[in-house]
Image: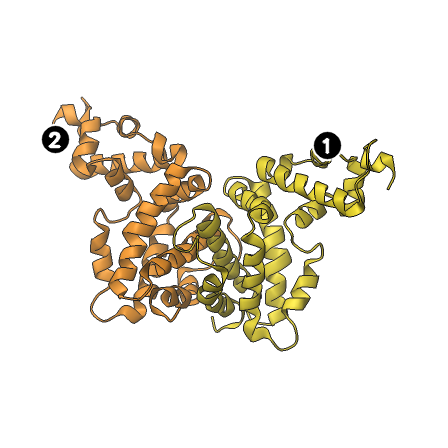
Chain colours: A orange, B yellow
């Protein structure tokens, strides 16, 4: 890694150090400024690196956003894992547990919560929700499950997922806000699974 | 009705005319200004009546809000109708249909949608959601159904209801946004019912 890329003249961080610094800066920027105003230039400045390094690691802002949210850079990969051979019956439970494990970490969920907040009044943020949560994640799960009425199922899943995030993390309605992951999975997964594969 | 109360010197509207004018003004004020800044004084001025008349009909701002949202002034009344003798099995379906019938009317849902939007970043609005949607409506449904774990069920119901409202009316994700009420009831009611009375 050259000094031009790191933008530092002192001790140079390792690759993983610089990457982590960028992701941390990105999480803060997306949460505080929203998607549109969180520029790569701002993120790079906060992380103390050259913007070129951000582009080098993450391609564009979308790639940076996906990485900062702890979504897999290639969502198809995690979905492949989730839809493993003939386990469609537990797909809802496993997906929900995976999501909750990420989101129960305040730092990891911060940009997504910021997006949801912004999406209530901002079309750009609403488009991000559609692009990431709906099109990239939920639609691919539904497609993998092979159910009928995939588009309707995708939006039904979005309704449960968004509502769960809002009640648990934004409005913090008790006891759902403080319930442990097992309790949430046990109570919500059957509903999630019905939207995925059940009779509608 | 005295001129002092209507605040008009011309033709005096009938009781129902003045009431409707106040409700219409209230819906606009709550939607545009949010709960906190929509004062009874502003609503009265818009409706062309004296603030005393607003107090006379609706008591306080909370009463006005409930009426403007087309919630029953006494939510216990509509809940009583919904939980009619031994029809707990269809309680989810009937409740959902009642809610959707109100909310599919853009004017009638406007203040509630405004509340939901505001609740994402405003504690006062979040409290309104808790007080009205959760405590006044959903908790009483759950209590009437007589199920175990009532508090958890109430927040699970809130997660589905808020998510449905957001996907259908705020983000307008298709095809759920344009689906007719029957389709939404058929697809969502079983999940709603499970949160109300099913095994968790």
Q: Residue A75: x and y, percent?
A: 24, 51
Image mark 1: chain? B
The residue carrying pointer 2 sits among few (fewer than 14), some (14 to 19) or many (20 or more) residues within 10 Å by Cα, namely few
The image shows residue A52, relative to residue B59, as above or below, that is: above
Q: Residue B146: x and y, percent?
A: 61, 72
* Residue B144 position by quadrant: bottom right
The residue closer to the viewer here, B139 or B14, is: B14
* Left or right of A161, for residue A135: left
Q: Secondary structure at mark 1?
A: helix
Q: Which mark is residue B45?
A: 1
Residues at circles 2 and 1 in contact by the CB criterion of under 8 Å: no
The residue carrying pointer 1 sits among few (fewer than 14), some (14 to 19) or many (20 or more) residues within 10 Å by Cα, namely some
Q: Residue A79: x and y, percent?
A: 24, 58
Furthest residue in direction front, as rendered = B11
Of circles 2 and 1, the one toward us is 1
Mark 2 and mark 1, same subunit? no
- Residue plotted at (21% across, 59% down): A80
Determine if residue A12 is in view. Answer: yes
Q: Which mark is residue B193?
A: none
Determine if residue A176 is in view. Answer: no
* Residue A112 position by quadrant: top left
The residue closer to the viewer here, B63 or A26, is: B63
Furthest residue in direction right, as rendered = B2
- Residue plotted at (62% across, 78% down): B86
Cα separation between marks 2 and 1: 67 Å
Furthest residue in direction bottom, as rendered = B86
Furthest residue in direction top, as rendered = A9
- Residue plotted at (31% across, 44% down): A69
Q: Which mark is residue A1?
A: 2
Q: Secondary structure at mark 2?
A: loop
Q: Which of the image's four quarters has the N terminus of chain B?
A: top right
Q: Residue A175: x and y, percent?
A: 52, 58
């Amino acid at each position: 890694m050259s000094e031009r890329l790191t933008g530092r003249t002192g001790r140079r961080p390792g690759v993983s150090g610089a990457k982590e610094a960028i992701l941390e800066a990105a999480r803060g920027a997306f949460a505080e400024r929203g998607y549109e105003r969180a520029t790569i230039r701002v993120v790079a400045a906060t992380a103390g690196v050259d913007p070129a390094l951000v582009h080098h690691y993450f391609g564009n802002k979308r790639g940076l956003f996906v990485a900062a949210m702890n979504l897999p850079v290639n969502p198809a990969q995690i979905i492949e894992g989730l839809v493993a051979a003939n386990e469609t019956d537990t797909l809802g439970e496993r997906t929900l547990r995976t999501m909750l494990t990420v989101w129960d970490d305040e730092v990891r969920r911060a940009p997504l919560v910021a997006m949801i907040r912004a999406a209530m009044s901002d079309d750009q943020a609403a488009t991000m929700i559609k692009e990431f949560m709906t099109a990239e994640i939920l639609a691919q799960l539904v497609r993998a499950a092979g159910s009928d009425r995939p588009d309707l199922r995708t939006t039904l899943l979005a309704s449960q997922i968004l509502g769960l995030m809002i009640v648990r993390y934004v409005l913090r309605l008790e006891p759902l806000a403080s319930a442990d992951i097992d309790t949430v999975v046990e109570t919500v997964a059957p509903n999630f699974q019905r939207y995925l594969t059940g009779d509608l």
